[in-house]
Image (cartoon, rainbow, N blue to C red):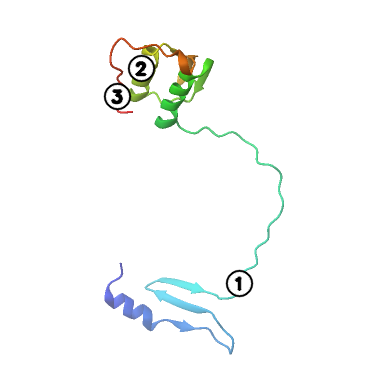
Amino acid sequence: MLPLAACNAAVNSISPGRGPHATRTRLTLGSHALSHSAAPTPLTARRSGPLQGRVRVPGDKSISLRSLILGALAVGETRISGMLEGDDAISTAKAMQALGATVERTGERAWRVLGVGVGGFAEPRAALDFGNS
């Protein structure tokens, strides 16, 4: 924020452009100058080829938990890579195991779930603990 004296000095140094149709304004704030021109600058767009490359995004808690749950609800094998391995994900994995799914860590941030299907969940022997999820 500028002190009032600096604002007054800046307002006093506003100078309009020269000429009958000039629309350029120059504003000086201390040693910094700001310029504005009303003349539009044309933009050019060109067609390009498809984007290519690889992107690795960090693990996400919500997606990690849902991946475990959906993998347990599916019939067959689900492979999860890039899983965020926090306490809540571990709690969710244990809860899916308690319901009858096979859940195992196969590598760094890599998991495998053998799902039992929507109607295949078993009744757990104890209350399920999902942590903070």
- Residue 1, percent across and down? 30, 67
- Residue 78, percent across and down? 52, 18
Q: Is residue 106 visible?
A: no
50 sits to left or right of 16: right
User: Residue farthest to the front?
Assistant: 119
Which element type, helix, strand or loop, lies under badge 2?
A: helix
The three-letter amino acid code for the residue at tag 1 is: Pro
Front residue (pair 41, 106) = 106
- Residue 22, percent across and down? 57, 84
Q: CA distance from mark 1 to mark 2?
A: 61 Å
Is 106 placed above or below 8 here? above
97 sits to left or right of 73: left
- Residue 133, percent across and down? 33, 28
| Quarter assignment of residue 97 | top left
Residue at left offset 46%, top offset 16%: 119
User: Who comes first in sequence, dot 2 or dot 3?
Assistant: 2
The three-letter amino acid code for the residue at tag 3 is: Gly
User: Residue farthest to the bottom?
Assistant: 20
On the image, numbered disc 1 is attached to which residue? 40
Which circle, 1 or 2, is nearer the viewer? 2
Q: CA distance from mark 2 to mark 3?
A: 10 Å
On the image, numbered disc 3 is attached to which residue? 131
| Quarter assignment of residue 4 | bottom left
User: Who comes first in sequence, dot 1 or dot 2?
Assistant: 1
The three-letter amino acid code for the residue at tag 2 is: Ala
Could you say which disc has been placed on residue 95 in the image? Answer: 2
Total numbered badges shown on the rendered structure: 3
Q: Is residue 28 visible?
A: yes
